[in-house]
Image (cartoon, rainbow, N blue to C red):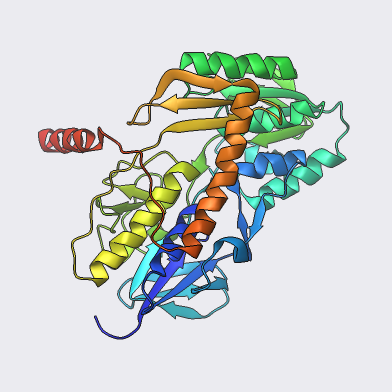
Amino acid sequence: MTGNIDVVVIGGGYAGVMAANRLTQRDDLTVTLINPRPTFVERIRLHQLVGGSDDAVVNYREILADGVRLVVDTVTRIDAAERSVTLATGGTASYDYLIYAVGSGSADPRVPGAAEFAYPIASLEEAQRLRSVVGSAPVTAAVTVVGGGPLGIEGAAELAELGRSVTLVCGEQLGPYLHPRGRRSVAKELSRLGVTVLDGPGATVTTVTRDAVQLGDGRELPSAVTIWSAGFGVPDLAARSGLSTDAVGRLLTDETLTSVDDQRIIATGDAAAPSDLPLRMSCQAALPLGSHAADTVLSRIAGERPADFSKGIAAMCISLGRRAGVFQAAHRDDTAMGLHLSGRLGAKLKEAVCTNTVKQLAAEAGKPGSHSWPVRDATRRQRLQAKLGEALAAQ
């Protein structure tokens, strides 16, 4: 390939920014980052926004390489045949390579009343709206958080620390990812903060009304503010554009993160499903996925075979208000181990992760190609082989 090469990155989250920055290693690339907002959103601080301790945004000038052109717009369609994307404002952008980094957001709630009366928290605008709602509610008003994953736990703890009356409805289990030891630490701290935790059989929300939440076992909880954090979904851009996706809507790729439909399209971050075995949605996975997506593009431009993705996730960090947290260590296949750190040390580690994540993006902007991730998934190849064996056996 000769002449200038156009690379378009859709999505300016953790993975998209990392990929865009890394691509600027070559001066014959024109890198365009298309994002619906003019500022970077620290997704892992949205619960702090709701609680009022952080605004959860960073100026792109602090983390985006000078060589990246930022376009504030939304991509409504990808035309793989024409190698172009359609923008919500009516324009188009052509590409030689496309990096699909649209991220994730709140899952579509299928529980009756949830869409009308519950407040999601997975995007900047949702968190800002919820902050306003919480701020206008009396301190004594009952708050119900639905979802026992990290976002639900963090949101419940943040509000309880402010003196709010909070009930956390988890479904079957509080913190399903956590090791039992880590789970006990989380439960202990939530109890100290005054959060009522409901889990086990029957602790599933079946209906949400304007002022109550009904559970599967027949209980009805008064709820002036209901917060919905039960699961994540991904934008349907890939599916709407005729590209192959998994059941959730993530773009299906091979192990190099290249779309199974088109070698010019590479997916990364929460919206990527390499070999239909996606990594856990997290900023921890987003950074190595973002750098790998850029490396795949750079390899293809150089006429080389891209490497397979082999990185793993080392831990899960959960904040429990501003003074406590849990750092849950994990095996290299991203399953929790017994080792965890809690209390003030856990809080410091979570804050260090949040701060360092932004620093890593800024470092890659200043020195493209410098980002490295030492954690490797030692079992991914085995799981891929097992998945292939199951597919062959089913034929």
In the image, 224 versus 68, the foreground residue is 68
Q: How many marks?
A: 0
Give the vertical position of 288 relative to 36 (above or below). Answer: above
Question: Which residue is pictured at 80% across the width and 27% down the height?
Answer: 164
| 165 with respect to 233 (left or right) | right
Q: Residue 153 at x, y = what percent? A: 62, 28
Q: Residue at x 63, y 66 (%)?
A: 38
Q: For residue 213, which quarter of the picture? A: top right
Q: In the orientation shown, which residue stands out farthest toward the bottom?
A: 3
Tell me if I can see residue 271 in this picture. no
Q: Is residue 219 left or right of residue 266?
A: right
In the foreground, 300 or 135:
300
Residue 380 coordinates in the image, percent (x, y): 25, 37
Name the residue: 19% across, 33% down: 382
- The spot of residue 85 in percent (x, y) is 43, 73
Q: Is residue 119 rendered to the left or right of residue 93?
A: right
The answer to which of 263 and 247 lies nearer the viewer is: 263
Left of 301 or right of it: where is 188? Answer: right
Residue 388, image x and y in percent?
16, 38
- Position of residue 241 relative to residue 51, above or below, is below
Looking at the rendering, in which quadrant would you find the C terminus? top left
Q: In which quarter of the image is residue 217?
A: top right
Would residue 274 be seen by someone viewing this image from the given angle? Answer: yes
Quarter holding the N terminus? bottom left
